[in-house]
Amino acid sequence: MKRLGVLFVALVGCNGGESRLDQVLALTGDEGDGATVFADNCAVCHGADGSGDSGPNIQGEDELEEVIGVVLSGEEEMPSFDGDLSDQEIADVAAYVTAGFP
Ligand code: HEC
């Protein structure tokens, strides 16, 4: 009698020590898709062209890691988008913002 009771206990996953910031940074953002994410989620506070409204002017933001960080964690009045946007959407919107609103 054969027993095929092989258990694969997957202990990977659980983020394996890699932060979500690292995961998003590892992706290639698409500026075109990011423009849509920005219009839908960010323009209400930062203006359609990033020049500011209730939120500050962010046209000069060129640090990808900083933009991804603030979108993930929020900052003061700026909400966190941790649960709202996928990793790819955050990579896209960060690519769009750091491109300087062409
Ligand atoms: C509810 C309004 C609101 C929304 C929506 C919002 N922001 Fe902000 N954002 C702010 C405010 C307010 C600040 C200034 C935070 C502070 O006082 O440090 C800010 C700051 C920032 C900064 C600059 C952080 C720094 O320290 O230089 C970036 C970049 C940014 N937001 C990007 C985004 C992106 C990208 C989105 C969409 C995914 C977004 N924001 C959505 C209000 C908002």
Image (tube, rainbow, N blue to C red):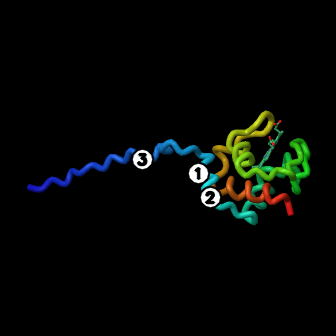
Q: Are marks 3 and 2 in contact (CB under 8 Å)?
A: no
Q: Which residue is mark 3?
A: 12
Q: Between marks 3 and 2, how big is the CA–CA gap?
A: 20 Å
Closer to the camera, 74 or 59?
Answer: 59
Helix, strand or loop at mark 1: helix
Quadrant where the N terminus is found in the figure: bottom left
* Pointer 1 with pointer 2, Cβ within 8 A: yes
Instruction: Tell me the SS state at disc 2.
Output: loop
42 or 72, nearer to the observer: 72
Q: Is residue 87 above or below residue 19?
A: below
Which labelled disc corresponds to residue 83?
none
The answer to whether 53 appears left or right of 7 in the picture is right
Residue 59 placed where, x, y %? Answer: 87, 53
Kindly identify the amino acid type of the residue bearing the numbered disc 2: Leu
Residue on which the image places disc 2:
27
* Mark 2 burial class by Cα count in 10 Å: few <14, some 14-19, many 20+: few
Circle 1 sits on which residue?
23
Q: Quadrant of ligand 1?
A: top right
* Element type where label 3 sits in the image: loop
**41 to the left or right of 102:** left
Identify the residue shown where x is 27% and y is 49%: 7
> Residue 17, percent across and down?
50, 42
Quarter occupied by the C terminus:
bottom right
